[in-house]
Amino acid sequence: MIIGIVVAAVVLVLLLVLVKSIRIAREYQRLVLFRLGRALGTRGPGIVFLNPVTDRTVLVDLREQYLEVPHQTAITKDNASISIDFIIFYKVVDPSTSVLAVGNFAGAALNVAATTLRSVVGDMPLDDVLSKREEMNAQLRVRLDEVTERWGVKVTNVEVREVNPPPSVQEAMTRQMSAERTRRAQVTEAEGSKAAAILAAEGQKQAAVLSAEGQNKAAVLAADGERQAALLRARGYASALDAIFEVAKTLDENTLALQYLDTLRQIGTSPSTKFVLPMEVGSLLNGVRGLLANQTPRAVSGQATTATKVTPGDPEPEPAELNPSPRANGSEPEA
């Protein structure tokens, strides 16, 4: 009975010693080994065998981590008080140094970040703090990295989350923003008016060009039409003249004299008191006299022919006198 109890106790002690002697470190973890208080370096990842009596370990995480810095009040170069909070991203690059060089990295990093922030903001005016975030982030990262490097920690990035200027500055910024938006609206409206005017001018220009081209084409077509009409009229006149000349070839002096007489008759019926004769009156009268002389024998010969028509058995009539004297007809002799 006693032996069984002793064996069980020994087995339990061995199990406890075995549990204390074996440690498992993950891939992103390292164990800083201390034996009798002296640092023997790092162990891991994987299974690490320890002496539970003399060995002690500190677990270090190698993954990138972040540290939130609460709102810190700082004064800018132009004496403006602002409140800033930011985030620090860091990772351990030397596990032994991170354990041996600093006791509380989080607290030390917060204090270093606050003092570094005041130093960086004090060298920048308020406008740069509000507008040049990237530049301020880079300066904070460089200065913090210079301090944490001796602790075996690398500051990978610093991001400023919020910058709160004083209320008076916020009000001034609001007015400035409103004025800037008003200016941009006016500029945009002016540019729109300018573009509209340019488009209208271009449209008027194109319309004028098209109108001028249309008028030019219309003038060309009108001139071409007038030319063709003139050619047709000229051809008509030429054909009429040719016809007149052909007819005139068959006319004699008697026809022309009759035309002259008709013209004189029309002139005589006109209410005008002045008229122009187309030729000498004497020549006209001579032509008319010749015409009448030619017409009279024809009329007399016609009458004679009619008068000499007799029936058979009658005596032959005497020939009529062709030129009876005026006295026989009861008329006065011609002067």
Image (cartoon, grey):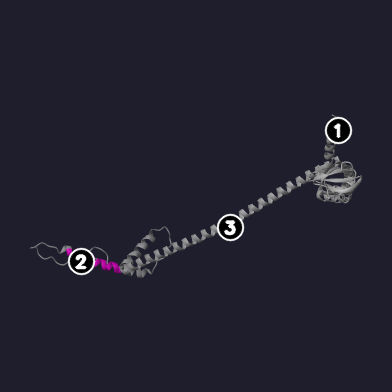
157 or 103, which is in the foreground?
Answer: 103
Vertical arrangement, residue 98 with respect to residue 322, above or below: above
Number of other residues with Cα within 10 Å of mark 3, as a class: few under 14, some 14 to 19, many 20 or more = few
Q: Are marks 2 and 3 in contact (CB under 8 Å)?
A: no
- Percent position (x, y) of residue 103? 90, 44
Name the main secondary structure of what is drawn in magenta: helix
Query: Does any portion of residue 138 appear in the rendered image?
Result: yes
- Nearer to us of marks 1 and 2 is 1
189 or 11, which is in the foreground?
Answer: 11
The residue located at (84%, 38%) in the rendering is 14
Q: Are marks 1 and 3 in contact (CB under 8 Å)?
A: no
The residue located at (42%, 65%) in the rendering is 234
Task: Write down the quadrant of residue 240 in the picture.
Answer: bottom left
Q: Secondary structure at mark 3?
A: helix
The kind of residue tagged 2 is Ser
Q: What span is in magenta?
A: 289-305
Task: Say which residue label 3 marks.
Answer: 209
| Residue 6 circle label | 1
| Residue 112 circle label | none
- Percent position (x, y) of residue 250? 30, 68
The kind of residue tagged 3 is Val
The residue located at (43%, 64%) in the rendering is 231
The residue located at (26%, 66%) in the rendering is 295
262 left or right, relative to 224: left
